Image (cartoon, helix red, strand yellow):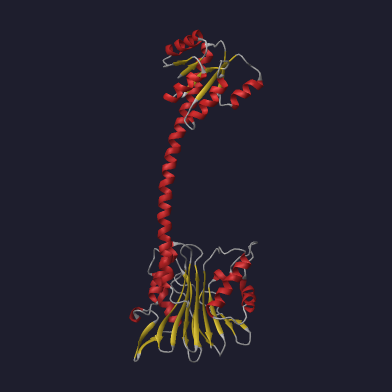
Amino acid sequence: MLVVDDSRAHCRLMSRTLERWGYRAREAGSGREALEICRAEEISLVISDWMMPGMTGVEFCRAYRALIGERPGYFILLTAQTEREALAEGLENGADDFLSKPFNAIELRARLRAGERMLNAQRDLTVKNGELSATLGKLSEAYGAIDRDLREARKFQEGLVPERFVPLGGADISLLFRPSGHVGGDMVGYFDIRPGEKGLYAVDVSGHGVSSALMTARIASYFSDAAPERNIALGRAPDGYAMLPPDEVCRRLNALLQRDGESDLYLTMILARLVIETGEVTLCQAGHPSPLILRADGGMEFREAFGMPIGLVDDAEFSTTGIALGAGDRLLLYSDGITECPDPEGTILDEAGLTDILQGLGATGGPTYLSGLVAALERYACTDDFPDDLSAVLIERR
């Protein structure tokens, strides 16, 4: 504690009073002398006279506050002044309390106890702020590590999607895959069946985030053509492999997911077989949005084939439908992130809005066509930060 007063006798009287109460008091005869003591020692409680030559108590208080910065400190001004303007000046310059001069011992002790409570509270707050800063630093490091891991996971997930454009002679295949976050629950791809035939799939796993992304990786492994003997859509044939009926494949996949009793995830999917030369497409729609046929003459048709989501119930029903693509026709398989894209007021695009967008894309094709679709969705939503993943498979018959 520091007592500052240009009156040696008054300074000595107060110091002895404080020492009787157990305080260790330093004395200073001027504001400048007091400031030098504060520079050399950590003083947290100050009692200073207001009216002093050279540097007033208010000026010393202002300098003291600048010196200690964020450190706890309690400053009591001794004054005979009672005008509101004078007291306001003291408060504005950093004083915490006032004590009438000559001082009353009972009043002084009460104000010192109040100051000690304030200092203890400030010290506790400083400690807690330090602990909070340390915790926030650790959380920031952890978040940075998670963010790096998720970025790597996104690269891995994007690596599961094969080439985004595949020319097949009589037809072209283009893929769109755009997660709404670091990783997503959508997946699109294709696999070889035999010369002239391709298998295609569009998957949308329920939910978002890491668990859904892991499920898409699992689904992609079931339809890999790197090891056809492990592809659940293929079966042995006299000349190699043939694709099983799409509805049968969906039943097999549903059974596999139903064995995972601990998982709450399910998925919607379209699984299709394309015969390139004839343009014949055989597909199963398992809860996924209805595929859209875009005819060469400009006509559009949503082809609905009922099927339940996969992994939801044991006895899910699936069926197969056929589509014939003529020269110049297209078939678009898309996720509900496209038709359920909201505008700023929350109105979703729906199927009618999708057909309007596609009509405006004109004669473009391939990846340019899908990029145009995404650009139109950005204009509709007035943002490029979509609430759901966007994915699509575009088949174009030459």
x then y, percent, for residue 252? 40, 77
Please tell me whether residue 55 is drawn above or below residue 228 in the rendered image: above
In which quarter of the view is residue 136 placed?
A: top left
x then y, percent, for residue 295? 60, 86
393 on left or right of 262: right
Residue 181 vs residue 215, the one in the foreground: 181
Please tell me whether residue 43 is drawn above or below residue 225 in the rendered image: above
Residue drawn at x 56%, y 23% is 59
Residue 73 vs residue 119, the one in the foreground: 73
Total labels: the figure holds 0
Residue drawn at x 40%, y 85% is 193
Residue 197 visible in the displayed image: yes
In which quarter of the view is residue 378 placed?
A: bottom right
x then y, percent, for residue 13? 48, 9
x then y, percent, for residue 153? 41, 64
Quadrant location of the N terminus in the rendered image: top left
Residue projecting furthest to the top: 9
Residue 126 vs residue 81, the one in the foreground: 81
